[in-house]
Each structure stands twice: as C-alpha cells, then as structure tokens.
Image (cartoon, grey):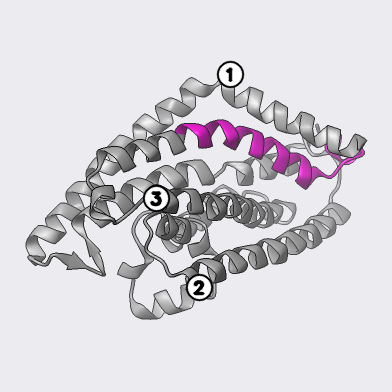
C-alpha cells in the first residue's frame, strides 16, 4: 500500500508539472500547424497530379484525417523520457534514485502518465472536434464508436513507447554521448510507427517486415482504429500484439536496467 502511494505521488507530480507548464504544451500543439500545412499541401499535390480518387487505399479526406490524427497522437504518445533517463545516468542524477525504496522505471512511468493525462485530455478534445468539423463522420468513415474503441490502443501505445524508449535510454550506461544515437533512433521510430505518413505507402517489403516489429503499434494501429479502418479480428489481434510487446519490452527493460546498474559507477549528482 505504501509502495502504491509513492507512485500515486509521482503521478500527481507529473500532472502538476504539466499543468504548471500547460502553455508550453499548447504552444507545441500550435506548432504542429506548420507540419500539418506542409503535409496537407504535399498530399493535395500528390492526389491532384495522380488524378486518382484513392491512393494506397486512402481517399484525400481519409489521408487528411490520418495526417492530422497521427500528428496529434504522436504529440501525445511520444515522450522525452529517453533523454531524461540518459541524462540521469550521465550526469549522476540517477544516484539519488538508487538509494530510494522504489522502482526507478515505475517512478518514471508514473510521472509520465501524470504528464500525459493533461496532454491526452487536450488532444482528445481536439480529435472530437475534428469528428464534428470534418465531413468524414457523415460519410460513415469514422464515428464516435471508433473513437471510444481507439482509447484502448492509444493507452497501450503509450506504455509500449515508454518501455521501448526506456530500453534505448539504458544505452547511456555504455555510450558516452547518446544524443545523436537517440535522434537517429527517434527518426526511424517516427517513420516506422506511421507518425509522418501511413505505413501503407512504404515499399511492400518494408510493410511486411514492419508487421513483426512493435513500431506500427505505436501510431499506425491506433489511428487505424480511430478511423474505423479495421476488422473486429484485426482489432483483437492488434491489441493482443500490443500487450505482448509491452510484456516483452517490460521484461527486457528490467534486464537491461539491472545489468546497467550493476556496472554503473555512482559519481556526481
């Protein structure tokens, strides 16, 4: 019970921190407008030049909604936890956590969930607004039932991304400067997760390979559920795959962390 209380306090700390800096987050959301303008203009030109009503299985309206949804969801799901943990390891900030009677990973996860609660409420309100404003709902392309169902994959994708980032952050135990490595890995994750464009537009070989990797279940799968572009069997299978990857990456992160801590020399802090 005392252990649970510690993580509740960590959650509250994350929530309070995000509320205090809510203007920064709102500005970061506003900055997405430039990205959306560029992507919308790009896809409009592609559809216009092709003369086709659908490309890669998407109409222009569907592609527009995908781009908007994936941009907003990536803003909500992605996290700077990789740099936070890497800096703790490199700068000695980790030392004060190692002597505390709680799990460092659970502490960071609790803080993250607190921060994401505030962000999620804002972004989900924006998505609901899209359902009302865009003429997609009236064409039965997307409905509120799909929106409600998508909440499960979105929560699971947040956990999946956390454990994936946690594993990559542990490389700081063995690599002196992880900035460029983290940057490169983040770019790969953004592309393979479908955060920039649907995975369907990639070469078939890459699409087939991505089915066996966890990345597409971070953005691409939740957006597919949100847009109603799925079968019931695909929804169940996708959620099971998400849960499976969370368990695998959760165990792997613990192994990496324990091994890294055993080799860690506490200096600074």
- In the image, is residue 155 part of the stretch drawn in magenta? no
Residue 170 point in image, percent of width and height = 71, 54
At x 61% / y 33%, what residue is drawn?
115
Q: Tell whether label 2 touches label 1 (CB within 8 Å).
A: no
Q: Secondary structure at mark 2?
A: helix
In the picture, which quadrant includes the N terminus?
A: top right
Of residues 21 and 134, the one nearer the viewer is: 134
Q: Main secondary structure of the magenta part?
A: helix
Q: Secondary structure at mark 1?
A: helix
Q: Tell whether label 1 touches label 3 (CB within 8 Å).
A: no
Q: Which mark is residue 162?
A: none
Q: Earlier in the sequence, mark 3 or mark 2?
A: 3
- Residue 100 showing in the rendered view: no
Residue neighbourhood size for the residue with mark 3, other residues' Cα within 10 Å, grouped as few (<14), some (14–19), many (≥20): many
Q: Secondary structure at mark 3?
A: helix
Q: CA distance from mark 1 to mark 2?
A: 42 Å
Q: Which mark is residue 70?
A: 3
Vertical order, 177 against 253 (above or below): above
Q: Earlier in the sequence, mark 1 or mark 2?
A: 1
According to the picture, the residue beneath numbered tag 2 turns out to be 233
Q: Which mark is residue 20?
A: 1
Disc 3 versus disc 2: nearer the observer:
2
Q: Give the side of residue 57 with respect to residue 30, left or right.
A: left
* Res 89 → quadrant: top right
Which region of the structure is painted magenta?
A: 96-122
Q: CA distance from mark 3 to mark 1?
A: 26 Å
- Residue 123 showing in the rendered view: yes
Residue 96 point in image, percent of width and height = 85, 34
């Amino acid at each position: 019970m005392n252990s649970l209380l510690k993580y509740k306090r960590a959650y509250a700390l994350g929530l309070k921190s995000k509320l205090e800096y809510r203007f920064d987050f709102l500005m970061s959301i506003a900055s997405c407008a430039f990205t959306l303008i560029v992507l919308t203009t790009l896809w409009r030109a592609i559809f216009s030049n092709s003369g086709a009503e659908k490309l890669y299985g998407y109409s222009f309206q569907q592609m527009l909604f995908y781009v908007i949804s994936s941009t907003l969801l990536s803003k909500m799901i992605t996290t700077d936890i990789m740099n936070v943990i890497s800096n703790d390891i490199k700068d000695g900030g980790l030392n004060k956590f190692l002597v505390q009677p709680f799990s460092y990973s659970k502490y960071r996860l609790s803080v993250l969930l607190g921060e994401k609660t505030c962000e999620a409420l804002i972004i989900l309100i924006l998505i609901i607004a899209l359902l009302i404003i865009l003429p997609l709902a009236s064409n039965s392309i997307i409905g509120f039932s799909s929106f409600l169902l998508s909440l499960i994959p979105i929560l699971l994708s947040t956990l999946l991304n956390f454990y994936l980032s946690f594993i990559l952050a542990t490389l700081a135990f063995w690599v002196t400067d992880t900035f460029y490595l983290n940057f490169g890995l983040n770019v790969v994750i953004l592309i393979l997760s479908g955060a920039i464009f649907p995975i369907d537009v990639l070469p078939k070989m890459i699409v087939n390979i991505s089915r066996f990797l966890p990345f597409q279940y971070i953005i691409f799968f939740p957006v597919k559920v949100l847009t109603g572009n799925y079968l019931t069997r695909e929804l169940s299978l996708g959620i099971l795959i998400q849960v499976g990857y969370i368990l695998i990456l959760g165990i792997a992160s613990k192994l990496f962390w324990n091994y890294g801590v055993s080799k860690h020399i506490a200096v600074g802090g």
